[in-house]
Image (spheres, coloured by chain):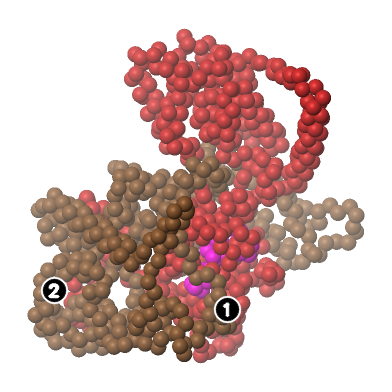
């Protein structure tokens, strides 16, 4: 086996955390040290009992030379700076399409948690305020809760490790009150829908305004709307989009038959995570110059309304679930048993009778769960 | 499973690993284009290179079943654009594509939003329509769902193989339940956590020769002591059985003068905090151990037995009381009351002081975590101590301590608590990141990681967006395109 690279600079001068600045980085290598170790790179490290030279190939020597030269920059990090081969924020030299995105700083995380749990702000409002994705806001709250719980239990945390990571990776700091806020990430991402893959040539009369709602219908092969109905929708676009997003998804129009049945593709305005921001922009464009106060007030009212609707929806879902389940708690028992009725119907079995939603054995429908190629490890972990 | 993830130099392969061999190979990686190679050869080579990195631990059959030709992408939308135009202008097609889609007036900073600001500053996402979406970079996106890969991406392990080992050895939980399958495919919203000790071991610098030896020595010593204690206990039991009347005598502990103790402690703390580079690490470590011991010794004198394990503020306040007051049994609460009584006139000054300390706290990253309701009281307490110390009439003993010195003592305590020297740990202590880690340090957007507790949430599946793809792959489109084509069924 080839000899391992002797690590001359293992125990570096100072303990990382004892420097006056709060940093985990070790002090950068001194040049004197590297040059002296370069000299003995050619001859093998002391081996008193063997006269054979270790197998040092040319490639290996080159690698060692690189590690002691250019590569030594990468050995230790500089706090608050990325330290990639490329000297940019892209860690892979051959891949310009991947960049190292910033992560949330600890202060920002705690602030988000505080705003959601203590100040009782909605996830949506916090997401817009800091430019953080709603799913990320929810995850942050969950993780900080877990952190607090672990602290209370007195479990050991990986604090020096966390500090080191936050020094190596770009970080979005908590914005100072008077400074201009910059978003952490794009919050209005529109996922590319499968139906929009094909290019469609669709002739439209010039007299007709062909907007995003119509385009969605064309992509999902739905018949064109009656002119009057289309005009109605167009007259008040804000109200149209609000209705679509706040009504139950079951009310979305469907086209196709049998297995091919699918919902009509909604316009982009309704499919982005924050449709209310479009309304706000529209208000700004129309009355923003003259009545900025009203715009602000409208925005707040809309946010509150969104929150109320979401809360209502959640409550209703909970009620529905309660209606379905029968709870039984035996005396002197730690457990509560919850029973829900099994449904084997057209909806759960599907047309072929093989739908996985329906439980149990059905005549003539073999279960393939032990067959080769089937997933046999858990597919979800329920909390 | 045998580890076949070698990092050869002759035919370099990039691996999911933070080793220096891998870093060297990565630095040599070029998008080599061999015009003489046939199409099939190009595809084969690309696929081989890409698979050596992506899911090397997954068999080819398994991966080809996971592969999906559908690549997820998103388009960041700007609400200002959507508000301005309902899409009819674009679809009217006037100008036959010569006129471009309406751009916002100025190129805004990426994803900027402020509801209270002027309309001119309301531009949302950057206008990225000019950039192409790098779809083929998403070829190996299905593998990012795997639990072991996600652990490696969250920087909880130094290689995908190590991450896999953590899972198999039962150190990983998904949604709070142990998960032993490295091939578990995470669903959006799943939270996974790894034992912090394992993560510290995986990402920390390894012990060197000297430290390993110290560990062995310490272990031996501990074993011997345990044996001796056992024997002593047995003897004591035997003696007690014979002469139960004899009372156990306590050795009178030598009580040092508090003033001298404090002085010595401060000197040690200062020596430790001193950032001069000439001091040898061994010497430094000795200093640290000495300091640790001294603190323990002082604290053990207090009647309160929980102080040694209690939170830092408490320790700190206890320490200061013990050293300041001549009566060791004096309770911190009493001290606080007294100081408040004495300094009734100095309310203003006090308020200023608290503000100062608050700012200090927020500045220093290692602000101590407060346990429950204890937090504010103890901070007040320590504040009271500081006040008491600044008050020259009250105690002559500690009047020489300046604010800075106190800060030094506090910081030394914080650091000692957070990152202690402990030979029982499997990594070099105090913990420091392993070499060459920073060159690989990146956390993809589809994960939200809390490094303090070594837990992360898989937010969503990775997506491509104009200009960027979220799958961390070292290869460019020249390699990923033929690799993608290889896995399409008809090749």
Prevailing SS of the magenta stretch: helix
Which lettered chain is shown in brown? A
Q: Which mark is residue A233?
A: 2
Residue B239 higher or lower than B26, as above or below: above
Instruction: Please give the chain letter of the residue carrying mark 1.
Output: B
Which residue does the numbered mark 1 point to in the structure image? B62
Query: Can residue A184 be seen by looking at this rendering?
Result: no
Spatial distance from mark 2 to mark 1, Cα to Cα?
49 Å
User: Residue drawn at (47%, 73%), measured in percent from left and top?
Assistant: B138
- Colour assigned to chain B in the rendering is red
Task: Please provide the residue range marked out in magenta.
Answer: B140-165
Q: Horizontal placement of A248 versus A159: left or right?
A: left
* Residue B153 percent location from the top left of the image: 53, 61
| Residue positioned 59% across, 64% down in the render | B180
Decide if residue B462 is on the left or right side of residue B162: left
Expressed as whole percent of the image width and height from the top left, the position of residue A371 reads 56, 83
**Rendered image: mark on residue B105:** none
Residue A369 coordinates in the image, percent (x, y): 53, 80
């Amino acid at each position: 086996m080839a000899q391992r690279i002797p690590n001359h600079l293992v125990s570096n001068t100072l303990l990382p955390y004892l420097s006056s600045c709060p940093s985990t980085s070790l002090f950068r290598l001194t040049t004197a040290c590297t040059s002296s170790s370069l000299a003995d790179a050619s001859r093998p490290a002391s081996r008193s009992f063997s006269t054979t030279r270790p197998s040092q190939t040319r490639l290996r020597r080159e690698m060692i030379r690189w590690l002691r030269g250019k590569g030594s920059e990468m050995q230790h990090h500089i706090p608050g700076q990325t330290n990639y081969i490329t000297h940019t924020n892209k860690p892979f030299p051959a891949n310009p399409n991947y960049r190292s995105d910033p992560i949330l700083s600890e202060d920002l995380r705690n602030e988000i948690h505080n705003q959601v749990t203590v100040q009782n702000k909605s996830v949506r409002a916090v997401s817009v305020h800091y430019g953080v994705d709603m799913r990320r806001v929810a995850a942050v709250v969950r993780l900080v809760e877990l952190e607090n719980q672990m602290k209370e239990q007195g479990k050991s945390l990986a604090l020096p490790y966390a500090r080191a990571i936050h020094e190596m990776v770009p970080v979005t700091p908590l914005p100072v009150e008077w400074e201009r806020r910059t978003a952490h990430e794009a919050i209005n991402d529109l996922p590319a829908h499968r139906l929009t893959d094909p290019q469609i040539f669709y002739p439209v009369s010039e007299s007709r305004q062909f907007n995003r709602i119509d385009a969605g219908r064309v992509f999902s092969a739905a018949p064109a709307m009656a002119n009057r109905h289309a005009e109605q929708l167009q007259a008040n676009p804000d109200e149209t989009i609000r209705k679509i997003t706040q009504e139950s998804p079951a009310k979305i129009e469907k086209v196709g038959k049998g297995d091919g049945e699918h919902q009509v593709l909604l316009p982009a305005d309704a499919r982005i995570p924050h449709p209310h921001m479009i309304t706000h922009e529209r208000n700004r464009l129309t009355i923003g110059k003259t009545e900025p106060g009203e715009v602000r007030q409208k925005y707040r009212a809309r946010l509150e309304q969104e929150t109320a609707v979401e809360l209502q929806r959640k409550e209703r879902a909970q009620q529905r679930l309660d209606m379905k389940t029968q709870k039984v708690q035996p005396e002197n028992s730690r457990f509560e048993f919850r029973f829900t009725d099994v449904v084997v119907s057209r909806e759960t079995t599907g047309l072929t009778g093989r739908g996985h939603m329906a439980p149990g054995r059905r005549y003539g429908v073999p279960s393939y769960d032990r067959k080769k190629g089937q997933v046999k490890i858990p597919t979800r972990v329920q909390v | 499973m045998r580890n076949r993830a070698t990092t050869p130099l002759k035919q370099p392969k990039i691996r999911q690993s933070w080793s220096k061999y891998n870093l060297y190979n990565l630095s040599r990686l070029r998008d080599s284009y061999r015009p003489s190679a046939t199409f099939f050869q190009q595809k084969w080579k690309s696929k081989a290179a890409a698979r050596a990195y992506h899911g090397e631990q997954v068999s080819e059959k398994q991966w080809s079943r996971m592969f999906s030709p559908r690549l997820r992408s998103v388009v960041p939308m700007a609400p200002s654009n959507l508000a301005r135009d309902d899409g009819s202008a674009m679809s009217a097609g006037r100008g036959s594509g010569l006129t471009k889609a309406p751009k916002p007036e100025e190129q805004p900073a990426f994803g900027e939003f402020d509801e209270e600001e002027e309309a001119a500053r309301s531009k949302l996402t950057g206008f990225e329509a000019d950039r192409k979406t790098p779809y083929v970079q998403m070829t190996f996106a299905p593998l990012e769902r795997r639990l072991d890969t996600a652990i490696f991406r969250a920087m909880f392990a130094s290689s995908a193989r190590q991450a896999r080992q953590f899972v198999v050895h039962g150190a990983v939980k998904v949604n709070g339940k142990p998960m032993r399958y490295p091939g578990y495919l995470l669903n959006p919203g799943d939270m996974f956590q790894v034992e912090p000790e394992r993560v510290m071991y995986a990402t920390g610098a390894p012990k060197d020769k000297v430290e390993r030896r110290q560990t062995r020595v310490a272990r031996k010593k501990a074993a011997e002591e345990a044996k001796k204690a056992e024997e002593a206990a047995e003897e004591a039991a035997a003696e007690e059985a014979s002469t139960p009347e004899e009372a156990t005598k306590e050795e009178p502990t030598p009580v040092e003068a508090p003033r001298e103790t404090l002085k010595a402690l401060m000197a040690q703390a200062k020596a430790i905090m001193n950032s001069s580079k000439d001091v040898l690490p061994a010497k430094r470590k000795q200093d640290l151990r000495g300091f640790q011991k001294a603190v323990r010794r002082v604290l053990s004198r207090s009647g309160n037995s929980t102080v040694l394990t209690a939170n830092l503020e408490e320790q700190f306040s206890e320490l200061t009381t013990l050293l300041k007051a001549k009566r060791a049994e004096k309770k911190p609460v009493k001290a606080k009351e007294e100081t408040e009584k004495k300094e009734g006139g100095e309310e203003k000054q006090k308020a200023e002081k608290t503000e100062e300390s608050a700012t200090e706290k927020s500045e220093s990253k290692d602000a101590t975590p407060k346990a429950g309701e204890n937090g504010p009281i103890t901070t007040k307490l320590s504040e009271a101590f500081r006040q008491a110390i600044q008050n020259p009439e009250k105690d002559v003993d500690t009047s020489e301590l300046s604010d800075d010195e106190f800060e030094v003592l506090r910081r030394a305590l914080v650091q000692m608590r957070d990152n202690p020297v402990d030979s029982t740990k499997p990594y070099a202590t105090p913990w420091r990141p392993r070499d060459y880690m920073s060159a690989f340090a990146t956390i993809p957007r589809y994960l939200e990681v809390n490094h303090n507790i070594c837990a992360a949430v898989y937010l969503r599946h990775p997506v491509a967006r104009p200009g960027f793809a979220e799958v961390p792959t070292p290869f460019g489109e020249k390699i990923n395109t033929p690799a993608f084509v290889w896995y399409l069924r008809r090749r």
